[in-house]
């Protein structure tokens, strides 16, 4: 891993720990060992999920996994709901969350985490 990528991962980790520390609606769980390139984000906000019969049902929490692939931040993160849950939103499928159309290396991980939370709440 290049020094710049390592520095970015460390800076992202520090920023999300500071920004979301004590946040009652967003819990961040690191996956693996430092420098972390995978996170579980637990959004404690109401959202709609599709039941197997296709009907939406309100839920109070959604678990999302965010992976920072090799080449990050030039290559965009990959996000998906855990457990194959399908959120009732056009940007969510059983296998992927469609993120920003125009990814740029300057986009910060904490902004992406906030954006997913806003999508869950249809903001």
Image (spheres, rainbow, N blue to C red):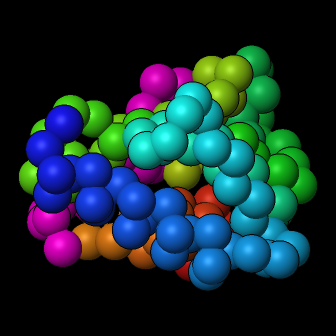
Instruction: Say which quarter of the image contains residue 23.
Output: bottom right
* Position above or below: 10 against 64: below
> Which residue is nearer to you in this view: 24 or 123?
24
Does residue 115 appear in the picture of this structure? Answer: no
**Main SS type for the magenta part?**
loop
**Residues in magenta, as a range:** 90-106
Whether residue 91 is in magenta: the answer is: yes
Quadrant of the image for the C terminus? bottom right
Residue 103 position, x and y percent, is 17, 61
Residue for point 69% across, 55% down: 28
| Residue at left offset 63%, top offset 69% | 17
Residue 108 drawn at (x, y percent)? 34, 71
User: Which percent across, then down, holds residue 7?
Assistant: 28, 60
**Residue 93, placed above or below residue 108:** above
Q: How many marks?
A: 0
Residue located at (63% from left, 78% from top)? 18
Viewer-side residue, 6 vs 65:
6
Quarter of the picture containing the N terminus is top left
Q: Is residue 71 visible?
A: yes
State the image quarter where residue 12 is shown. Answer: bottom left
């Amino acid at each position: 891993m290049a020094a710049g990528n390592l520095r970015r991962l460390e800076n992202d980790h520090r920023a999300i720990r500071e920004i979301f520390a004590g946040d009652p609606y967003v819990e961040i769980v690191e996956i693996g060992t430092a420098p972390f390139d995978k996170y579980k984000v637990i959004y404690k906000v109401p959202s709609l999920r599709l039941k197997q019969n296709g009907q939406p049902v309100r839920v109070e929490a959604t678990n999302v996994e965010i992976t920072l692939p090799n080449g990050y931040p030039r290559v965009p993160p990959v996000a998906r709901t855990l457990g194959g849950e399908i959120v009732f939103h056009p940007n969510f499928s059983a296998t992927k969350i469609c993120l920003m159309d125009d990814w740029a290396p300057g986009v910060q991980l904490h902004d992406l985490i906030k954006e997913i939370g806003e999508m869950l709440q249809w903001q």
